[in-house]
């Protein structure tokens, strides 16, 4: 398996939690694909949040062979990986979801703190 990482944003987030989430989701996604598959990690900004995509390269989706026999197949360790990632992402106000098209693609969001409305200053410390 090959992992290509595109341009990723600098996020206002706990780096250790986010690292654990990304590693868990890459491992989960990799488990659905045969050796030789190229997985990509990329990001796009939409609606004041960053959407991070982990999955097969879009050019490969049409001819992938998937390791798991179907969308209902989940190994016991998948639950731990998903729970680890979900907790880390949700702690930052984001969400996690999957899409399947002859393989698994994982998406998660992290709010763009720089684009969120700021609370007006009251002159008092928070």
Image (tube, rainbow, N blue to C red):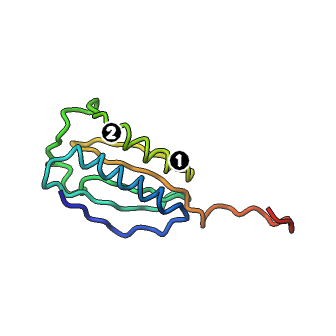
Left or right of residue 25, residue 36 in this image: left
Q: Quadrant of the N terminus?
A: bottom left
> Which residue is depicted at the point 43% across and 45% down?
84
Q: Residue at x 15, y 47 (%)?
A: 34
Q: Which residue is mark 2?
A: 78
Q: Nearer the viewer, residue 83 or 90?
A: 83
Q: Residue 74 in the image: state x and y as whole percent.
A: 29, 33
Give the percent coordinates (x, y) of residue 62: 17, 48
Query: Residue at horizontal 53%, vertical 60%?
Result: 14
User: Is 60 placed left or right of 82 in the picture?
Assistant: left
Q: Nearer the viewer, mark 2 or mark 1?
A: 2
Total numbered badges shown on the rendered structure: 2
The image position of residue 29, as x and y in percent, is 28, 47
User: Which quadrant of the figure contains the C terminus?
Assistant: bottom right
Camera-side residue: 48 or 65? 65
Nearer to us in this view, 12 or 79: 79
Rendered image quadrant of residue 47: bottom right
First in sequence, mark 2 or 1: give its number.
2
Q: Which residue is mark 1?
A: 90
In this view of the protein, which residue sits in the foreground, 49 or 19? 19
Residue 69 in the image: state x and y as whole percent: 18, 33
User: Taking 2 as reference, is 78 left or right?
Assistant: right
Q: Residues within 10 Å of mark 1 (few under 14, many from 20)?
A: some
Is residue 123 placed above or below 82 in the rendered structure? below
Tell me what residue is drawn at x 22 percent, y 32 percent: 70
The extreme right residue here reads 123
> Marks 2 and 1, Cα distance to the nearest angstrom?
18 Å
């Amino acid at each position: 398996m090959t992992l290509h990482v595109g341009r990723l944003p600098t996020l206002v987030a706990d780096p250790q939690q986010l690292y654990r989430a990304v590693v868990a989701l890459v491992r989960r996604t990799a488990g659905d694909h045969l050796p030789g598959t190229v997985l990509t990690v990329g990001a796009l900004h939409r609606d004041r949040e960053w959407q991070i995509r982990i999955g097969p390269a879009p050019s490969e989706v049409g001819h992938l062979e998937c390791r798991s026999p179907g969308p209902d197949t989940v190994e016991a360790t998948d639950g731990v990986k998903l729970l680890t990632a979900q907790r880390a992402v949700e702690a930052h106000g984001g969400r996690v979801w999957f899409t399947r098209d002859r393989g698994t693609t994982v998406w998660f969001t992290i709010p763009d703190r720089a684009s969120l409305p700021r609370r007006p200053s009251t002159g008092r410390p928070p």
